[in-house]
Amino acid sequence: MKAAQRFVELGFELVATAGTADALEAAGVAVAARVDKLGDEGATETAVDLIQRGDIHLVVNSPRGRGRGPTAATSAAAGVAGIPCLTTAAAALAAADGMADWQTHDLHVKSLQEFHQR
């Protein structure tokens, strides 16, 4: 939940399936939109649909014991679209912390040699 809150603080809008959205909102994290689970009967709009439309810019998609079907399809769609896909809470928190750090420092590119000269 900490990573999700951090992304909201950074200005991201979260999109989640119903169960994830319920858990996030119960923890006080705002969810901008809900999507149907991939493969659910009657699903009208899924994360894959949003990814393919270009509406998603970062995917946090951690598999949880239900097999790889929907999770693999979402990750694959992100890969095809060239969208970063994080698969653990630790990776999501590290990414959010890194983005927050960028906002407080100028970005400078240096070669390894330059770092080792110090």
Image (tube, rainbow, N blue to C red):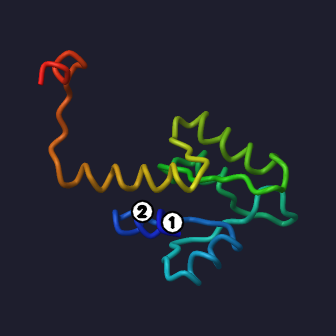
Give coordinates of residue 47: x percent, y percent.
65, 56
Residue under the image location 44 percent in, 70 percent down: 5
Q: Report the residue marked by disc 1.
A: 14
Secondary structure at numbered mark 2: helix
**Where 21 sits versus 94, above or below?**
below
Would you call the spot at circle 1 few (<14 residues within 10 Å), some (14-19), or many (20 or more)? many
Would you call the spot at circle 2 few (<14 residues within 10 Å), some (14-19), or many (20 or more)? many
Q: Is residue 105 left or right of residue 45?
A: left
Q: Is residue 87 left or right of residue 14?
A: right
Contact (Cβ within 8 Å) of mark 2 with mark 1: yes
**Res 112 quadrant in image:** top left
Residue under the image location 22 percent in, 54 percent down: 103
Distance from label 2 to label 1 (Cα)?
Answer: 8 Å
Looking at the image, the residue that sits furthest to the top is 113
Task: Inspect the image, locate mark 1, and give the three-letter code of the amino acid beneath it.
Answer: Leu
**Where 46 sits versus 20, above or below?**
above
Residue closest to the eye, 33 or 67: 67
Task: Inspect the image, locate mark 2, and give the three-letter code of the amino acid beneath it.
Answer: Phe
Give coordinates of residue 96: x percent, y percent.
40, 55
Give coordinates of residue 9: x percent, y percent.
35, 69
Q: Nearer the viewer, mark 2 or mark 1?
A: 2
Q: Is residue 51 left or right of residue 3?
A: right
Count of labels shown? 2
Residue closest to the eye, 73 or 4: 4
Residue under the image location 20 percent in, 15 percent down: 113
Give coordinates of residue 76: x percent, y percent.
68, 38
Question: Which is nearer the N-term, disc 2 or disc 1?
Answer: 2
Q: Report the residue marked by disc 2.
A: 7
**Where 29 sits versus 109, above or below?**
below
